[in-house]
Amino acid sequence: MTELELIIDLHKNSERQGPGSEHDTLRALGLLNLPTDQNLKVADIGCGSGGQTITLAKNLNAHITAVDLFPEFLNELNEKSQQLGFNGKVVTLEKSMDDLPFKQNAFDLIWSEGAIYNIGFENGLKKWKNYLKVGGYLAVSEITWITPSRPKEIEEFWKAEYPEVDIASNKIKQLENNGYSLTGYFYLSQDSWMETFYKPMQARFETFLERNGHSELARKVVEDHQAEIDLYLQFKDYFSYGFYIAQKKVEHWAKSYKERAANNEHQ
């Protein structure tokens, strides 16, 4: 198996492939003002095995398109959906998030927990805005500094891993500069990293190694993930995922200008 295949194998049969929790998903949902008298169109981009997708399905009157690049995770989500009777409510799509087949103004809500970094935060804001109806919502979690300054070691690590890491106020400016209006923000608690992601992952290390014959590459995968956990434990007071909930703005000025221009043409 390749290293990527081993990483997928490690993360299979887990509720989440990144920090988060049902509590966080519900908290973000609570910051939306969605209509309740219609069936909503929702996209969950970078859904993984769909822990948050199932929470959305349980709490929304919606048709959900769950997108991920890896069929192993989508198969798990399909099984969960079928068991819960959501197989008509949740439809999976194996696709890269930078090559989506969606039409303009297709969705009332675009959701993405811990995944937008794959194409870059601002790039994702611009691309995905086209798929949102005017007044529709975007809800994404993104790695974020939670203090104004931090030790050089962790700053250099994240800037090398993901140069777009930033403080929340700058992320919010990016949202506003790209046609969104912020409706809510919070950052994930340490429990959302340790209790629902890292500790369950650590509990899978031994069976993962046994399943893969304690190969050198399998041991490397475990060591790399443990190093990630150690880094988080050392510097957990300085960064987390920020959850950003924003609404696609109605461009009143542009609309009124076009209407005036059209009226003048007919006079």
Image (cartoon, rainbow, N blue to C red):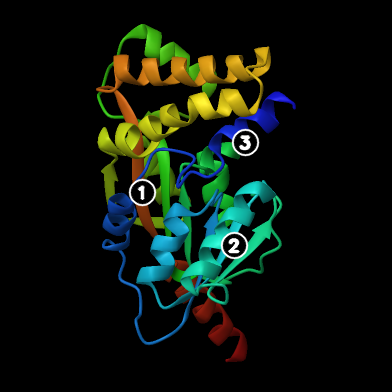
For numbered disc 3, what is the local secondary structure? Answer: helix
Q: Quadrant of the C terminus?
A: bottom right
- Residue on which the image places disc 3: 8
> Residue visible at 57% across and 72% down?
87
Q: Residue at x 30, y 14 (%)?
A: 234
Q: Which of 129 and 191 is in front in this view?
A: 191
Name the image quarter holding residue 130.
bottom right
Q: Residue 244 carries which label?
A: 1
How far from the left and from the top, in percent, is residue 266? Answer: 60, 91
Residue type, mark 1 in image: Tyr
Amino acid bearing label 3: Ile
218 on left or right of 192? right
Looking at the image, tell me whether mark 2 or mark 1 is earlier in sequence order: 2
Q: Do the residues labelled 3 and 2 touch (CB within 8 Å)?
A: no
The outermost residue toward the bottom is 267
Residue 156, position in %: x, y?
A: 45, 12
Q: How crowded is mark 1: few (under 14 residues within 10 Å), some or many (20 or more)?
A: many
Do the CB atoms of the residues marked 2 and 1 lie less than 8 Å apart? no
**Above or below 12: residue 163:** above
Which residue type carries mark 2? Asn
What residue did someone put label 2 on?
78
Between circles 1 and 3, the one closer to the viewer is 3
Q: Distance between the Cα atoms at labels 2 and 1?
A: 27 Å
